[in-house]
Amino acid sequence: MSTESQVNANRRNAQSSTGPRTPEGKSISSGNATKHGLSAAFRVLPNEDQQAFDESVAGFQRDFQPTNSYEQFLVEEMAQARWRVARIRRFETAVIEQMLGVADPADTDVRIASRFLRKTADPLLVLQRHAAAAERSGRHALKQLLALRKLEAQAARDRARQNEPNSSEVEPPTRGKGERNGGSTGPATPPPEATPEGPSAASPEPAPLNAP
Protein backbone atom coordinates (compact mmCIF):
# COMPACT_ATOMS: atom_id res chain seq x y z
CA MET A 1 0.00 0.00 0.00
CA SER A 2 1.27 3.49 -0.82
CA THR A 3 2.22 5.68 2.12
CA GLU A 4 0.79 9.14 2.63
CA SER A 5 4.06 10.73 1.49
CA GLN A 6 4.01 8.73 -1.74
CA VAL A 7 0.44 9.76 -2.44
CA ASN A 8 1.31 13.43 -1.90
CA ALA A 9 4.35 13.12 -4.16
CA ASN A 10 2.22 11.62 -6.92
CA ARG A 11 -0.22 14.49 -6.61
CA ARG A 12 2.57 17.06 -6.93
CA ASN A 13 3.99 15.30 -9.97
CA ALA A 14 0.57 15.22 -11.62
CA GLN A 15 0.12 18.95 -11.04
CA SER A 16 3.52 19.80 -12.48
CA SER A 17 2.99 17.63 -15.60
CA THR A 18 0.30 19.43 -17.55
CA GLY A 19 0.99 17.92 -20.95
CA PRO A 20 1.40 19.84 -24.23
CA ARG A 21 0.58 23.51 -24.06
CA THR A 22 0.69 24.72 -27.69
CA PRO A 23 -2.08 23.91 -30.20
CA GLU A 24 0.43 21.96 -32.31
CA GLY A 25 1.54 19.89 -29.34
CA LYS A 26 -2.03 19.16 -28.31
CA SER A 27 -2.89 18.05 -31.84
CA ILE A 28 0.07 15.67 -31.96
CA SER A 29 -0.73 14.30 -28.51
CA SER A 30 -4.37 13.66 -29.38
CA GLY A 31 -3.31 11.60 -32.39
CA ASN A 32 -0.74 9.46 -30.63
CA ALA A 33 -3.24 6.84 -29.51
CA THR A 34 -5.00 6.68 -32.88
CA LYS A 35 -2.18 6.90 -35.40
CA HIS A 36 -3.36 3.80 -37.17
CA GLY A 37 -6.20 2.47 -34.99
CA LEU A 38 -4.64 -0.97 -34.67
CA SER A 39 -3.50 -1.14 -31.06
CA ALA A 40 -5.83 1.43 -29.47
CA ALA A 41 -9.42 0.85 -28.41
CA PHE A 42 -11.55 0.23 -31.46
CA ARG A 43 -13.02 3.18 -33.29
CA VAL A 44 -13.95 4.02 -36.85
CA LEU A 45 -11.26 6.35 -38.16
CA PRO A 46 -12.21 9.72 -39.64
CA ASN A 47 -11.35 8.55 -43.16
CA GLU A 48 -13.47 5.41 -42.80
CA ASP A 49 -17.17 4.96 -43.49
CA GLN A 50 -19.17 4.81 -40.26
CA GLN A 51 -22.30 3.74 -42.13
CA ALA A 52 -20.44 0.86 -43.76
CA PHE A 53 -19.23 -0.30 -40.35
CA ASP A 54 -22.76 -0.09 -38.91
CA GLU A 55 -24.06 -2.16 -41.82
CA SER A 56 -21.33 -4.73 -41.21
CA VAL A 57 -22.36 -5.00 -37.54
CA ALA A 58 -26.00 -5.36 -38.59
CA GLY A 59 -25.01 -8.18 -40.95
CA PHE A 60 -23.27 -10.04 -38.12
CA GLN A 61 -26.35 -9.56 -35.96
CA ARG A 62 -28.60 -11.01 -38.67
CA ASP A 63 -26.28 -13.98 -39.10
CA PHE A 64 -25.85 -14.83 -35.40
CA GLN A 65 -29.06 -13.44 -33.86
CA PRO A 66 -27.68 -12.54 -30.39
CA THR A 67 -30.21 -13.20 -27.63
CA ASN A 68 -28.60 -11.34 -24.71
CA SER A 69 -26.11 -8.59 -23.97
CA TYR A 70 -23.09 -10.90 -23.78
CA GLU A 71 -23.87 -12.50 -27.13
CA GLN A 72 -24.28 -8.98 -28.53
CA PHE A 73 -20.82 -8.11 -27.20
CA LEU A 74 -19.27 -11.17 -28.86
CA VAL A 75 -20.97 -10.41 -32.17
CA GLU A 76 -19.63 -6.85 -32.08
CA GLU A 77 -16.16 -8.20 -31.29
CA MET A 78 -16.31 -10.30 -34.45
CA ALA A 79 -17.47 -7.33 -36.52
CA GLN A 80 -14.68 -5.15 -35.14
CA ALA A 81 -12.08 -7.83 -35.82
CA ARG A 82 -13.21 -8.08 -39.43
CA TRP A 83 -13.05 -4.29 -39.78
CA ARG A 84 -9.53 -4.21 -38.35
CA VAL A 85 -8.35 -6.86 -40.81
CA ALA A 86 -9.79 -4.89 -43.73
CA ARG A 87 -8.09 -1.75 -42.39
CA ILE A 88 -4.74 -3.51 -42.17
CA ARG A 89 -5.07 -4.75 -45.76
CA ARG A 90 -5.53 -1.14 -46.87
CA PHE A 91 -2.43 -0.09 -44.94
CA GLU A 92 -0.41 -2.89 -46.52
CA THR A 93 -1.44 -1.66 -49.95
CA ALA A 94 -0.49 1.90 -49.03
CA VAL A 95 2.93 0.79 -47.73
CA ILE A 96 3.65 -1.08 -50.95
CA GLU A 97 2.56 1.95 -52.99
CA GLN A 98 4.90 4.11 -50.90
CA MET A 99 7.75 1.73 -51.59
CA LEU A 100 7.00 1.80 -55.31
CA GLY A 101 6.65 5.58 -55.37
CA VAL A 102 3.13 5.52 -56.79
CA ALA A 103 1.22 6.53 -53.65
CA ASP A 104 -1.10 9.53 -53.45
CA PRO A 105 0.28 11.86 -50.73
CA ALA A 106 -3.21 13.20 -50.02
CA ASP A 107 -4.58 9.77 -49.15
CA THR A 108 -5.00 9.23 -45.40
CA ASP A 109 -3.94 5.59 -45.60
CA VAL A 110 -0.79 6.66 -47.40
CA ARG A 111 0.04 9.17 -44.69
CA ILE A 112 -0.39 6.46 -42.07
CA ALA A 113 1.79 4.17 -44.15
CA SER A 114 4.47 6.86 -44.18
CA ARG A 115 4.53 6.74 -40.39
CA PHE A 116 5.15 3.00 -40.51
CA LEU A 117 7.94 3.44 -42.98
CA ARG A 118 9.64 6.12 -40.89
CA LYS A 119 9.34 4.38 -37.53
CA THR A 120 9.41 0.66 -38.37
CA ALA A 121 12.19 -1.29 -40.05
CA ASP A 122 9.76 -3.84 -41.48
CA PRO A 123 6.27 -2.25 -41.66
CA LEU A 124 4.74 -5.16 -43.55
CA LEU A 125 5.79 -7.58 -40.81
CA VAL A 126 4.26 -5.31 -38.16
CA LEU A 127 1.02 -5.10 -40.14
CA GLN A 128 0.92 -8.87 -40.52
CA ARG A 129 1.24 -9.25 -36.75
CA HIS A 130 -1.63 -6.82 -36.22
CA ALA A 131 -3.72 -8.74 -38.75
CA ALA A 132 -2.99 -12.05 -37.01
CA ALA A 133 -4.00 -10.55 -33.66
CA ALA A 134 -7.27 -9.24 -35.12
CA GLU A 135 -8.06 -12.60 -36.69
CA ARG A 136 -7.38 -14.38 -33.38
CA SER A 137 -9.70 -11.94 -31.63
CA GLY A 138 -12.49 -12.69 -34.08
CA ARG A 139 -12.02 -16.45 -33.83
CA HIS A 140 -11.93 -16.27 -30.04
CA ALA A 141 -15.21 -14.34 -29.96
CA LEU A 142 -16.82 -16.87 -32.31
CA LYS A 143 -15.54 -19.78 -30.22
CA GLN A 144 -16.96 -18.22 -27.06
CA LEU A 145 -20.31 -17.60 -28.71
CA LEU A 146 -20.61 -21.19 -29.94
CA ALA A 147 -19.54 -22.59 -26.55
CA LEU A 148 -22.07 -20.39 -24.77
CA ARG A 149 -24.88 -21.53 -27.02
CA LYS A 150 -23.87 -25.16 -26.57
CA LEU A 151 -24.14 -24.76 -22.79
CA GLU A 152 -27.50 -23.02 -23.12
CA ALA A 153 -28.82 -25.81 -25.34
CA GLN A 154 -27.64 -28.47 -22.87
CA ALA A 155 -29.27 -26.58 -19.99
CA ALA A 156 -32.55 -26.42 -21.93
CA ARG A 157 -32.44 -30.18 -22.55
CA ASP A 158 -31.77 -30.83 -18.87
CA ARG A 159 -34.74 -28.67 -17.85
CA ALA A 160 -37.01 -30.45 -20.31
CA ARG A 161 -35.85 -33.82 -19.01
CA GLN A 162 -36.58 -32.77 -15.42
CA ASN A 163 -40.10 -31.68 -16.36
CA GLU A 164 -40.95 -35.01 -17.97
CA PRO A 165 -43.19 -37.27 -15.76
CA ASN A 166 -41.67 -40.42 -14.34
CA SER A 167 -43.16 -43.24 -16.40
CA SER A 168 -42.67 -45.80 -13.60
CA GLU A 169 -44.97 -43.81 -11.31
CA VAL A 170 -47.82 -42.82 -13.60
CA GLU A 171 -48.07 -45.83 -15.92
CA PRO A 172 -51.59 -47.33 -15.52
CA PRO A 173 -52.01 -51.06 -14.90
CA THR A 174 -52.38 -53.26 -17.95
CA ARG A 175 -55.99 -54.13 -18.66
CA GLY A 176 -57.01 -57.53 -19.97
CA LYS A 177 -59.11 -58.09 -23.04
CA GLY A 178 -62.13 -59.02 -21.02
CA GLU A 179 -61.85 -55.90 -18.89
CA ARG A 180 -61.55 -53.70 -21.94
CA ASN A 181 -64.77 -55.29 -23.30
CA GLY A 182 -66.64 -54.78 -20.04
CA GLY A 183 -66.29 -58.35 -18.82
CA SER A 184 -65.21 -59.60 -15.42
CA THR A 185 -61.86 -58.54 -14.14
CA GLY A 186 -61.38 -61.81 -12.22
CA PRO A 187 -59.31 -64.74 -13.43
CA ALA A 188 -60.80 -66.68 -16.29
CA THR A 189 -62.41 -70.01 -15.35
CA PRO A 190 -60.35 -72.85 -16.78
CA PRO A 191 -62.28 -75.20 -19.09
CA PRO A 192 -63.42 -78.52 -17.57
CA GLU A 193 -61.15 -81.43 -18.08
CA ALA A 194 -62.22 -83.90 -20.69
CA THR A 195 -63.84 -87.10 -19.29
CA PRO A 196 -62.06 -90.27 -20.44
CA GLU A 197 -64.09 -92.77 -22.38
CA GLY A 198 -65.08 -96.05 -20.82
CA PRO A 199 -65.92 -96.77 -17.20
CA SER A 200 -64.95 -94.21 -14.75
CA ALA A 201 -62.00 -94.91 -12.57
CA ALA A 202 -64.21 -94.18 -9.58
CA SER A 203 -66.81 -96.88 -10.55
CA PRO A 204 -66.64 -100.08 -8.40
CA GLU A 205 -65.55 -103.29 -10.09
CA PRO A 206 -68.29 -106.05 -10.37
CA ALA A 207 -68.22 -108.69 -7.61
CA PRO A 208 -66.89 -112.09 -8.66
CA LEU A 209 -69.48 -114.92 -9.02
CA ASN A 210 -69.40 -117.71 -6.41
CA ALA A 211 -68.61 -121.13 -7.75
CA PRO A 212 -71.50 -123.67 -7.53
Image (cartoon, grey):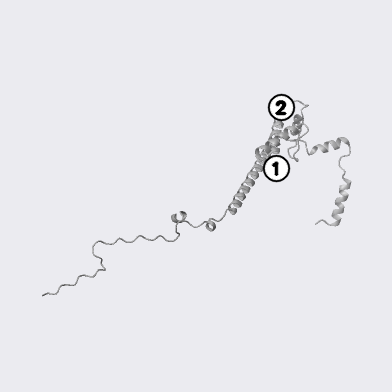
Residue furthest toward the top?
102
Which residue is under mark 2?
97
Q: CA distance from mark 2 to mark 1?
A: 38 Å
Q: Position of residue 91 (x, y in %)?
A: 72, 32
Rendered residue at 70%/36% (across/down): 58
| Dot 2 and dot 1 residues touching (CB under 8 Å) | no
Specify the amino acid type for callout 2. Answer: Glu
Is residue 200 left or right of 165 when viewed as pictured?
Answer: left
Specify the amino acid type for callout 1. Answer: Gln
| Quarter occupied by the N terminus | bottom right
Classify 14 as above or below 98.
Answer: below
Q: Position of residue 35 (x, y in %)?
A: 77, 36
On residue 72, the disc is: 1
Rendered residue at 88%/47% (across/down): 15
Element at label 2: helix
Q: Position of residue 110 (x, y in %)?
A: 75, 29
Could you say which quadrant of the image residue 42 lies in? top right
